[in-house]
């Protein structure tokens, strides 16, 4: 019962949201499109980050990426730092939000989608065909048993693409005779080995310290999604990975 208040807050937000009419927003930080940058926006970003909500209201209403509004500091991700900046702005600690770098168009997935391998599907019902459902605190998952990216109607496209990229990895594993052994993707497939070699060379903002093969598997899915949906951000923050994606993905 520690978080009983969260239910009240979420209920209030839902009401506010329902009562608000939306202009297609363009105000950075205004993730609920109510025309202002307020602590409510910070709260929504924190809930999104924690997986309590699968998408920001702005994205649901406009169909555009959450990153347009929620990525306040321009690092390419929606994180608690963005929420903190909004709270600092609201409290008068900072006078303006940081300048956001203007993305330069770069060749990439050109926002076309990674085609699903034959027999693989995206299932937006929240449950796989064999009855596994998205659990509390999770926004989506990949079901290897039924070869489905399991998401909800409201799941952010970046997340849908992330799960689609897991389907791509599954196809690679199947082709290598490794079944659905995702822990072997990074170590036992040519694709995985080559990816890790490239990703380890990153020194920029999106360089990671992967302490387990699982992290590489997830890192691939995340960066593959970035490649298709926001190649500019990937090229800026992880240029070696970006080049690898260009050379290895359709
Ligand atoms: Zn994943």
Image: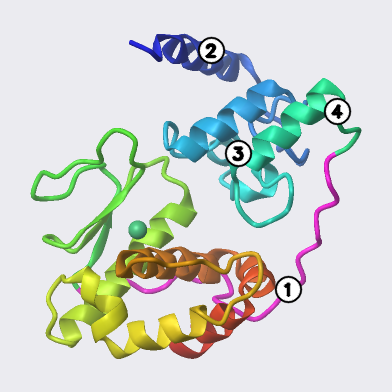
* Relative to 215, residue 5 above or below: above
Would you identify the image quadrant in which residue 242 lies?
bottom right
Q: How many numbered dots are placed on residues in this image?
A: 4
* Camera-nearest label, 2 or 3: 3
Quickly name the residue at label 4.
Answer: 93
Q: Residue at x 36, y 68 (%)?
A: 165
Q: Secondary structure at mark 4?
A: loop
* Camera-nearest label, 4 or 2: 4
Quickly name the residue at label 1.
Answer: 105
In this orientation, which residue lies closer to the viewer: 191 or 104?
191
**Measured Cα–Cα span from mark 2 to mark 1:** 39 Å
Q: Secondary structure at mark 3?
A: helix
**Measured Cα–Cα span from mark 4 to mark 1:** 34 Å
Q: Secondary structure at mark 2?
A: helix
Disc assigned to residue 15: 2
Within 10 angstroms of label 4, few (less than 14), some, or many (20 or more) residues?
Answer: few
* Camera-nearest label, 1 or 3: 3
**Measured Cα–Cα span from mark 2 to mark 3:** 24 Å
Would you identify the image quadrant in which residue 196 lies?
bottom left
């Amino acid at each position: 019962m520690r978080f009983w208040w969260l239910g009240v807050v979420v209920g209030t937000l839902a009401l506010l949201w329902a009562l608000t009419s939306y202009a297609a927003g363009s105000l950075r930080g205004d993730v609920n499109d109510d025309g202002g940058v307020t602590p409510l926006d910070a709260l929504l970003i924190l809930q999104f980050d924690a997986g309590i909500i699968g998408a920001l209201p702005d994205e649901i209403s406009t169909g555009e990426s959450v990153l347009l509004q929620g990525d306040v500091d321009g690092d390419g991700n929606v994180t608690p730092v963005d929420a903190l900046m909004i709270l600092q702005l609201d409290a008068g600690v900072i006078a303006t939000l940081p300048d956001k770098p203007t993305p330069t168009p770069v060749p990439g997935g050109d926002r076309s989608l990674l085609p699903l391998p034959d027999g693989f599907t995206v299932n937006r019902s929240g449950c796989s065909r064999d009855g596994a459902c998205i659990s509390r605190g999770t926004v989506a998952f990949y079901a290897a048993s039924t070869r489905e990216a399991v998401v909800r109607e409201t799941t952010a496209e970046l997340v849908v693409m992330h799960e689609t990229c897991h389907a791509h990895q599954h196809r690679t594993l199947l082709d290598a005779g490794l079944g659905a052994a995702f822990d072997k993707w990074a170590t036992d497939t040519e694709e995985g080995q080559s990816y890790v070699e490239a990703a380890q060379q990153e020194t920029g903002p999106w360089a990671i310290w992967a302490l387990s093969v699982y992290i590489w598997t997830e890192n691939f899915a995340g960066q593959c999604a970035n490649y298709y949906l926001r190649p500019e951000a990937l090229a800026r923050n992880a240029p070696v990975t970006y080049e690898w994606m260009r050379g290895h993905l359709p």
